[in-house]
Image: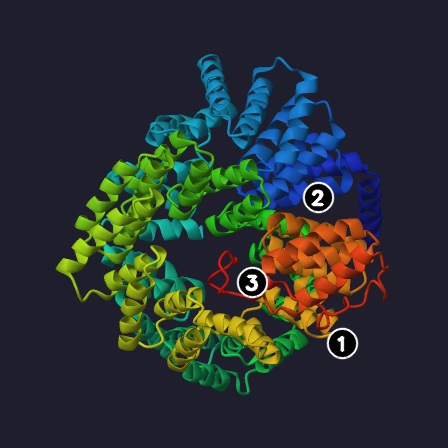
Amino acid sequence: MPATFRPVLTVPLLVATLLVSGCKTDEERAAGFLQSANELLAAGDTDRAMIELRNVFRYDGTNREARETYARLLTERGEIADAYSQYLRLIEQNPNDLDLRLRVAEMALKSGNWDEFQRHTAAAEGIEPRNPAVRALVLARDYREAVQRRDAAKRSSIADSARVMLASFPDLQVARRIVIDETLAGPRPLDALPEVEEALTREPAAYELNLLKFRLQVQAGDLEASGAQIRAMYERWPENAQVRGLMVAWLRETGDTAGAEAFLRRIAGPDDGAVDGHLMLVQFLRQTGGDAAALAELDRLIAANGATEAGRTYVSTRAGMVFDQGDRDGAIAQLQSTLEGAEPSQVTDRTRVMLARMLLATGDRVGARAQVEQVLGHDSGQIDALKLRGRMLIDEDKPGDAIISLRQAQGQAAGDPEIPTLLAEAHFRAGDAELGGQMLAQAVSASGNAAAESLRYASYLLQDGRTNAASGVLAQARRVTPDDVRLIGLQANIALQASDWTTAAQLLEQLRRIDTPQAQDTARRLQAALLTGQNRFDESIDFLRGLVTQNDNSAQSVAQVLQAQIQAGRTDEARSYLDGLLADKPDDRDLRLLSGTLDALRGENEAAERALRKLNDETPGNEQVIRILFGVLQSQGRADEAAEVLAAGLAANPTSRRLRWIQAGEFERTGKIEEAIGLYEQLYAENSDDVVIANNLASMITGYRDDPESLERGYTIARRLRTLNHPAYQDTYGWIIYRRGDVRGALTYLEAAARGRSNDPLIQYHLAVVYDALKRPADAAPHLRRALEIAGDSALPQMEAAREMLARIESGTPPAGAPDAAPAGAPDGAPAAAPTDPARPGTEATDG
């Protein structure tokens, strides 16, 4: 029967088929997958096409068509980092391909990866230097260098060259971006809008260009055009959180709060859907309707979701709001109740971390640590728990352990800017400023040049003296958020310090165009500073007095007038002006406080004391009043009365950080050393990031204690000071490492401290001790004489040691004792006077 033989015939045919297929080469398999990918792309099935392209690479990793197609698709999906890595693979295989070099250089330029941009630009220049696209990249490189050098003339010249190039080669987007950037930095940034629109005709999917177009339209006040633009962006990027937020902001700007709420409810979906959209709605309701509206929405969502993970998320969010409102115990109890019997999960872990943050804020470090460790016991890679553990370890002066925890977190969330920010804190705490700076730079990159991270990094660069680099960071950040008042304000400060009046004036004009109270206040202060900086005191004072009239004699505006008058040396004019205001408002407390302060500055101590005591009687515990009155009494040698004022102030305001800081100085002055150390310990435990308190505490425990544990703890606290170029900090760190035996290392710090603060007897004494230990008596003697001259009849015990040391040196007697021992006559070493005496004029960090 035919049926009987069919299987017998089929088996050989099947075997033959398998043999034939098994004979296909890798090249043939790759070609088949590539053909399949192209067919799927033609049919619009991008996802499956990308799978087929990855299959090509399994058999032919050098297939250029497949990799270029794959990189292009990644770029179109916005996965720029992955696309970039694909193009780098192509360049490895084709290092002299100009098109690939141009493409990668442009990608690096857009992402701000300057090292890569320069590398590929140099390679392209070596391949074909006269190519217009290559010349545009070279212009971009030169333009960035001009920006960093703050060479306005060079920037303008390069932008002109870019315009000339665009006239012949309008498709050169790199050249167009130079023109756009230079226009944005100029006095008429709105003139960049036509260039942005022209760029978008060639790159319609460029997100940053679309965003810039929208912001310029908003800045121009064109609500209709900006509305059309943000709607178009939402259609293209409906899942983009920033676009959604801008849509809501635009609706609110037009007064359509109901429309904004409806939009958020639409993208949030059903009540039992994904939580992210609903949490955005809750935040919006809190901004527009207050806490009551947000809590009502959360209560509705909690009821709709019950005991689900979404429900617990809303309970946690509600507890966070209650905590912020001040009911800390209630919020903590609510979270603890939610966690009772809860199975480990991502939501449970996030809730425990939130509870840990609350416990930490209330001072319960043990409870916070227990919650964090419970989360990490369940999931050793939980990002938020690792970050919080890192934060706590930094606070505990264990930066090495913190770095281990934070590195683990960074390995799983490289794009989280908070992690490198915390790593920077850990490295700074360990005294490694260079690594700390690198981490701050990483945070800027991870955040996409966000304002907060950029301000933090720019401030570090300024502290390090790298003004041009700081300006570059701020310029990049302003491309992302051009109207951020903080960024503009810091740029303006840099310009003022450099006497760059043109740039300061341009920034002033931009501030005036931003219709917010913060922007207008910053603009007023910048206007006054600009006039004063140019010695146009009359104009500055007239301008500020006009503001006082406009703001109904606000204390802040009046203080600015007085400051300008004092700067101009017109203290009598300041007194007359303030008296005139007080005649109209004799009971105004702010004006009376300014009056007492002005009297103190003018040396009219009796009048100042009378005014300040009256204010102090009316409102006991006011920090400003007590601080100024304390200083007035101290300046007259009435230390006991000053101490009484301070004690009464602390009784009325026992949690005041500033008053407790002053009290610590008083304790030391009166010889209550352990009480002073105890108070510094308390302040340090509350905020170990406070560098001034860290300096004072380290100085005191190593200055008045001699046990190894105190010396080690002082060094642990003081490590962060070793890269800070301030005499008080250099003295503290240098003296501590001297006491730990590093005599030569101490010399560098103490010499710098003595140069920076030549009128401090204890700093001069510390340097003399080190010179003496190094058998350099001829160098020690002048500093001992200087210390004794400055100290006069001071009862400082270190000055008695200085007299004995000087007498020994002058008699030619060699020093006795090991270099790492405390100097003879000093009470277990000597503290740095400047940082531990907050009442002394010239002491740094008056805010504690």
Asked if residue 162 shows in the view, the reply is yes
Mark 3: which secondary structure?
Answer: helix
Q: Residue at x 31, y 41 (%)?
A: 528
Residue annotated with mark 1? 707
User: In the rendered structure, which amino acid carries the disc numbered 1?
Assistant: Asp
Marks 1/2 in contact by CB < 8 Å: the verdict is no
Image vertical order of residue 283 relative to residue 540, above or below:
below
Image vertical order of residue 539 relative to residue 412, above or below:
above
Q: Earlier in the sequence, mark 3 or mark 1?
A: 3
Q: Nearer the viewer, mark 1 or mark 2?
A: 1
In the image, taking residue 325 as reference, residue 452 lies left or right, namely right
Q: Nearer the viewer, mark 3 or mark 1?
A: 1
Q: Position of residue 275 (x, y in %)?
A: 44, 67
Given residues 156 and 121, the one toward you in this image is 156
Disc number placed over residue 55 in the picture, else none? 2
Q: Position of residue 744 (x, y in %)?
A: 80, 53
Q: Nearer the viewer, mark 2 or mark 3?
A: 3
Mark 1: which secondary structure?
Answer: loop
Q: Earlier in the sequence, mark 1 or mark 2?
A: 2
Residue annotated with mark 3? 692
Callout 2 environment at 10 Å: few (<14), some (14 to 19), or many (20+)? some
In the image, taking residue 207 as reference, residue 19 lies left or right, namely right
Given residues 280 and 567, the one toward you in this image is 567
